[in-house]
Amino acid sequence: MASGTARYLRYILFAFFGLAVVYFISSSSSTQRLGNLSEFTKSGILSQAGKNPQAGQKPADGDTNLSTETTPNTPAGLPPATADGPRMNATFVTLARNSDLWEIARSIRQVEDRFNRKFHYDWVFLNDKPFDETFKKVTTSLVSGKTHYGQIPVEHWSFPDHIDQDRARKVREDMAQRKIIYGDSVSYRHMCRFESGFFFRQELMLNYEWYWRVEPSIELFCDIDYDPFKFMADNKKKYSFVLSLYEYVETIPTLWDSTKKFMKAHPEHIAEGNSMGFLSDDGGETYNHCHMWSNFEIGNLDWLRSKAYLDYFEALDQDGGFFYERWGDAPVHSIAAGLLLKKEEIHFFNDIAYYHVPFTHCPTGEKTRLDLKCHCNPKDNFDWKGYSCTSRFFDINGLSKPEGYENQQD
Ligand SMILES: Nc1nc2c(ncn2[C@@H]2O[C@H](COP(=O)(O)OP(=O)(O)O)[C@@H](O)[C@H]2O)c(=O)[nH]1
Ligand SMILES: *[C@@H]1O[C@H](CO)[C@@H](O)[C@H](O)[C@H]1NC(C)=O
Ligand SMILES: *[C@@H]1O[C@H](CO)[C@@H](O)[C@H](O)[C@H]1NC(C)=O
Ligand SMILES: CC(=O)N[C@H]1CO[C@H](CO)[C@@H](O)[C@@H]1O
Ligand SMILES: [Mg+2]
């Protein structure tokens, strides 16, 4: 009887203590939280209070080694731990405004959790304006590799001299009336031209051979347990994608005319065994508007810096469609990859599950999704739906579609 009462009393005391700890933690600021938590841990109080979810680290998921996998700030001079295999000459790259901070923070967190916390690749941030201290502080704290911040030279983010300003303005007014998305935006056009022709030539990017582009507000739904950069190199890939679709025609009415002019002028740049069948249904006469979505890209920077790619960009830039229409970097990259590369040099990453509003790529194949601990709903997968071009990519490459694709066509 007496020992029973004592036990109850102990429970009540523990419960009270637990609540007090929870209250204390939730009412302190985050820096205090860390400092004081460690105090508590040292004195052993937290381990007694037990199950408070904020107190413990995340439960081990089998292969998690906390001491190696959380490397917030490796001391200067010491290379950070990497997963098995050689470290590739690669970086993440993000174009962003200071106001994109919290949206890019979410993207970084997911890229780190699903992949980079084990690999610690660098991250280059580019902006047409100087990044502010908050942006740099927060992103540096989130990225497990080194971070670099670059300001884009004005020449890479402005109208070339040959652009007729009146004509460009009239186009914007007309597109605004027709409610074409970003149709009236000057900055969006600079952005598209920059991503088409300049990001890979920024001083900070010259240090790397491979890039992985990340935009604000994206999601990754599956673990990436291997190094996609190494995969690209080992398999002689130069460009890759996860989502493909038809471009909004109003934004690129003459892009294919310019492309055909370029093909005539530079037959030496057109690869044998290219992906023309992905881009055109009539052997190149007309464009079917298929493109790979460039808000996700893993690719080879030396290819983008090649004479072939630069000649293509230069030809497009001369024709002025970035301003007289609203050419996007996605169709530009895709057409370049489709014509200047051999078709085997383009890769579709089925296992990289991805969301950028409004489309989702969720891997086809239940085994893949379970093995990679995916949290996307397979019903959301866009790959095999009518507005996706991914089926076409499989067809021209003679690839067999993953098991289960038939059930995801609508
Ligand atoms: N520095 C800078 N970045 C921009 C600007 N406009 C867009 N971006 C970035 O360019 C990328 C594409 O822009 P976003 O708004 O996501 O376009 P959407 O994905 O086509 O709707 C994102 O990484 C943006 O952060 C701009 O004016 N300045
Ligand atoms: C975790 O990593 C440390 C440092 O590399 C190593 O000494 C330790 O054995 C590892 N523990 C486990 C459980 O793998
Ligand atoms: C990384 O790639 C760039 C561009 O190709 C090259 O200039 C640089 O020397 C490479 N760095 C290393 C360490 O290989
Ligand atoms: C590191 C840190 O902020 N520690 C705080 C812990 O809580 C005490 C009060 O209980 C503060 O005085 C410390 O500054
Ligand atoms: Mg975006």
Image (tube, rainbow, N blue to C red):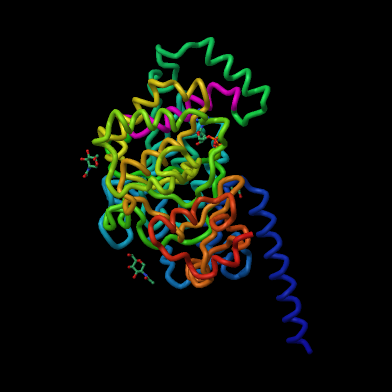
Q: In screen coordinates, is 171 left or right of 24? A: left
User: Residue 382, how many percent across, how many down?
Assistant: 57, 55
Q: Would you identify the image quadrant in which residue 46 lies?
A: bottom right
The foreground one among 260 and 387 is 260
Q: Position of residue 247 (x, y in %)?
A: 54, 39
Residue 78, above or below 57: above
Q: How many marks?
A: 0
Q: Is residue 293 above or below residue 57?
A: above
Q: Nearer the viewer, residue 53 or 86?
A: 86
* Image quadrant where one finds the N terminus: bottom right
Q: Residue at x 51, y 52 (%)?
A: 110
Farthest bottom residue?
A: 1
Residue at 57% over, 36% down: 248
User: x, y (%) of residue 37?
Assistant: 55, 56
The residue drawn where x is 44% and y is 41% is 140
- Residue at figure coordinates x 56%, y 34% from the top left: 249
* Residue 123 picture location, percent across and down: 39, 42
Magenta-tinted stretch = 183-203
Residue 378 falls within the magenta-colored stretch: no
Q: Tell whether position 195 is magenta.
A: yes
Residue 264 visible somewhere in the drawing? yes
